[in-house]
Each structure stands twice: as C-alpha cells, then as structure tokens.
Image (cartoon, rainbow, N blue to C red):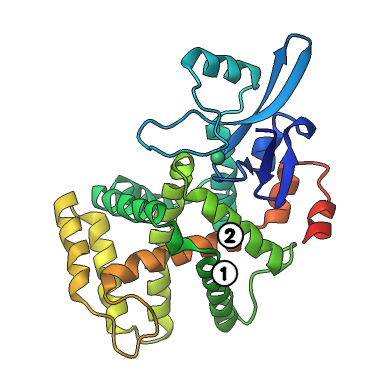
Amino acid sequence: MKIGYSLFLGEIIEAIKIDYTDCKNFQIVCPKCKEPVFKVVRNNNDETIDYLSHYEKDKSYVQDCELRVSKLDDTFIQKLNTNSQNQKLEYFLSVLKESIIENEFKSKEIPKPHNHYLSQIKRSKAIAKFREMVFDFSMKHPIYWSEETINEILEDYIGEIKSISGSFYETSFSLQIQKRIAKDIWQHLLTPKTKENYNFLFNYAYYFLITRLEEAAKVRTSNNWEVILHNSMVQIMQKSKDKGLQILTSLGNHPMPENYDGDAPTLFEKLPAEISYEMIGVLLRLPYFEIIKKYNFNFSGDLIMKTV
Ligand SMILES: [Zn+2]
C-alpha cells in the first residue's frame, strides 16, 4: 500500500515520504486494520516503488485486510526483509513497551518488588487462559470497543483521576491529543500482530488493579466486592491453572451490588472490564510528546498542533 497511518501523529503518511525507521518511530500502521507495517523500496527495472507492507500473515488467525499484500511467498518475504533494513516487528513493538515501563516505574527496567509480581502474573497459566479469553472476545466483537465506548472510558478515567488528585497527569500534549493517541493505540492493540504488547499491558494492568485496590483500602473502607475481587486476583496469580480457573469462574457467583453503577452483572464480568479500564488509563497517561521526541530528534510537535 502507498499510505500508512501514524498512531502518534494521527495523520495519513505517504510511503514515499518516509524513511525505514519512521514506521517504528512514528508507530505507522495500516490505515484500515491498524496492524503494524514496514517500509519497502522495490526496484522494478528502472523504477523504484516505495510502499508499506503488513508483517507476514499469522497462521493462527484468519484475518484479512483489503490492504494486505496477499500471496507473499517465503522467498519474497525474505527479500522484503533484507530490503527493508531490519524493520523487525519486535523493534516496532518495543517502543510502546519501553515507554510504558519508563513512565510507570520512572526507570528503564521494572524495579523490585514489582518485577517479582509481574513475573508471577506472566507465568500464571490461569491468567494466560483468562487473558486469551478477553483478547479473543475483543477481537470477535469489535462493536464492544466502539469509538463511543472508548471515549466514554477515557472520560471516566480522566474524571476519576481528577476526583482523586485534583487534576489529570501533566502532559505536554493537550488532553485531547492524549485521548486521540490512546484510542488509536488501543484499537491497534486489538490486532493479532500486536498481541505481545496487549499481553504485556494486560499483565501490568492486572497488577496495577491489585495495588490500586490495596491503596484504596488504606484510605477508606473497601466494599465487599472489592475485597473478594482483590483476594481472588491474588489467588488466581498464585495457584495452579485448574485452581486459578476455578476461582475465576466462581467470580460469577458474586453479583454486583444493586446500587452499583455499571454494566457488569457479576464480578466475572467486572474483572475484565476493570483490567481494560486500567490498560486504557496507562495509555492515556503516557507522555507522547516526549516519546515522539525521543525517537525523532527534530520533532517539534508542529504537525500535531496544527492538525488537531
Ligand atoms: Zn491492514
């Protein structure tokens, strides 16, 4: 395809105008399906053709994008990869992961004791199964993640942070731009090629939710459902796969209180909703201006300021 979409800039980008590293640095994705793409320059006789290509088709997913360059055989892919100057998917995905670690922990690596709990969550087979269910549900029901729903969550999140700390996190971009980027990245994370980042963010949000419930318990009396949710989450993380899944299923036996203002009928539906909420919150508070600047020395923000 001749064009891509930059998650960071919120702009359609022409393949011919960008460099190989720009796909990673400006997080350029397919405008239609939001999967990562990489730049290819192909010489055809005397003519050079610049275009953007999806990473190879994942065998485990039957998902077709109109803009996908189909029928790529292995030798062709290999040739593309050598022509595309090492634009590995891994590098593309590392931008978001590294940025989240840096912003959440103010450190390049996850410090103790957080890394211990996060590894435990990563190792838990019950959580892996649960995460898979939540991801599959989102993939199969895109309507569940409509623009309207995402906007509502973003507003709720901002409202909640404001009510707790008086104001939302300081960001160099306006809140409107922060929301636009968070929404684009969220939609991009709900694609098969970005699952690794989805998993990372899910695990982090799982942990964040546990600590958030603990923090809340220090300043006010927890609701009964919060206590059950917290204890179950900790147990699911520590127990075997079968036991963990049993605890997870048993959350369905705990209806949300009648005065509770939300859609989840029981804690079983409440848990994935809370985790997704925290995942979107993490995306919303990332310092996008600084991240783009870090990867693009000359970035001044003019382009974004003008277009939003
Ligand atoms: Zn696509």
Instruction: Judge whether 243 appears above or below 21 on screen.
Output: below
**Alpha-carbon neighbours of circle 1 within 10 Å: few (<14), some, or many (≥20)?**
some
Residue at the spot of label 1: 151
Location of the N terminus by quadrant is top right
Residue furthest to the front: 66
Residue 69, by quadrant, is top right
Q: Are marks 1 and 2 in contact (CB under 8 Å)?
A: yes
Q: Is mark 1 within 8 Å of ligand 1?
A: no
| Quarter containing the C terminus | bottom right
| Structural distance between the alpha carbons of marks 1 and 2 | 8 Å
Q: Position of residue 88 (x, y in %)?
A: 56, 28
Could you tell whether 180 is left or right of 120 in the image? right
Give amino acid for label 2: Lys
Q: Quadrant of ligand 1?
A: top right
Q: Is residue 11 above or below residue 86?
A: below
Q: Which mark is residue 292?
A: none
Q: Quadrant of residue 298?
A: top right
Of 36 and 206, nearer the camera is 36
Q: Earlier in the sequence, mark 1 or mark 2?
A: 1
**Vertical placement of 174 versus 65: above or below?**
below
Residue 155, image x, y percentages: 57, 74
| Residue on which disc 2 sits | 183
Outermost residue, top side: 45
On the question of residue 108 being in view, the answer is no
Residue 144 drawn at (x, y percent): 43, 63
Q: Residue at x 79, y 10 (%)?
A: 46
Which residue is rendered at x = 57% and y = 34% of the image? Answer: 91
Mark 2, Cα crowd under 10 Å, few <14 / some 14-19 / many 20+, is: many
Q: Residue at 76% of width from left, 33% of height from top?
A: 18
Q: Nearer the viewer, residue 223 or 135?
A: 135
**Residue at the (46%, 67%) spot, across then down:** 277
